[in-house]
Image (cartoon, rainbow, N blue to C red):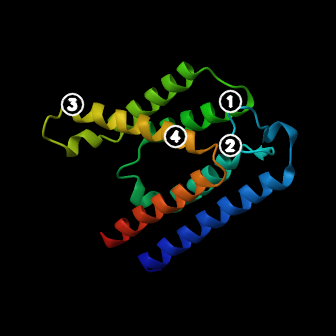
């Protein structure tokens, strides 16, 4: 198969798995899976919490289908960092974790991602400071996305817009 067909089939498979998992989670209406509104909530009725599982399911399919290309930049450190973030999110959805515990796990994941992927090697000016800027940017992005997650549909819309822009930039390369 041509690379373009492989890329589109990976995109379609990833999207399909995410949609199916999200629809399944919503259809289950498990009491433990619902986020009940409180004084800080932006929603007025209970909403499912586990939408990230659907997104992660799609990510796993996409990574598996594109592993031959991705393995040049993604290594065990990046995979472990992603799994750490997923586990912390799942635990936090079941039982609210203190902010310092989430921040510590996010910091560890960001350090693993930046140093594990050797992203700092590409920035040879001020090599000692760029990794820490990358870590701060990752921490900011993770927390910004967590903040948006409570806004019905906003996080999903931002993911579609952001990752579509990345896909277009990747395709242009």
Element marked by disc 3 = loop
Marks 3 and 2, the one that precedes in the sequence:
2
Spatial separation of the CA atoms under disc 3 and disc 2: 38 Å
Query: Dividing the picture into quarters, in which one does residue 95 lie?
Result: top right
Q: Residue furthest front?
A: 39
Count neighbours of disc 2 (C-alpha within 10 A) and say few if under 14, some if 14 to 19, many if 20 or more: few
Would you name the residue on which mark 1 appears?
91
Dot in front, 4 or 2: 2
Would you name the residue on which mark 4 appears?
82
Q: Residue at x 68, y 49 (%)?
A: 51
As drawn, the label of residue 129 is: 3
As drawn, the label of residue 42 is: 2
Report the number of numbered marks. 4
Query: Dividing the picture into quarters, in which one does residue 148 lie?
Result: top right
Q: Are marks 4 and 2 in contact (CB under 8 Å)?
A: no
Spatial separation of the CA atoms under disc 4 and disc 1: 14 Å
């Amino acid at each position: 198969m041509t690379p373009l067909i492989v890329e589109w089939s990976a995109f379609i498979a990833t999207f399909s798995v995410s949609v199916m998992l999200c629809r399944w989670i919503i259809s289950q209406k498990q009491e433990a899976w619902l986020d009940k509104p409180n004084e800080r909530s932006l929603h007025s009725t209970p909403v499912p919490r586990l939408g990230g599982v659907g997104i992660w399911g799609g990510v796993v399919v996409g990574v598996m289908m594109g592993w031959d290309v991705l393995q040049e930049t993604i290594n065990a450190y990046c995979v472990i960092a992603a799994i750490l973030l997923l586990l912390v999110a799942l635990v936090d959805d079941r039982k609210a974790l203190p902010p310092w515990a989430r921040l510590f796990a996010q910091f560890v994941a960001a350090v693993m991602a930046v140093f594990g992927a050797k992203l700092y090697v590409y920035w040879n000016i001020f090599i000692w400071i760029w990794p820490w800027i990358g870590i701060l940017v990752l921490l900011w992005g993770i927390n910004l996305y967590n903040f948006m997650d409570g806004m019905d549909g906003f996080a999903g819309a931002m993911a579609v817009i952001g990752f579509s822009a990345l896909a277009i930039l990747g395709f242009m390369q």
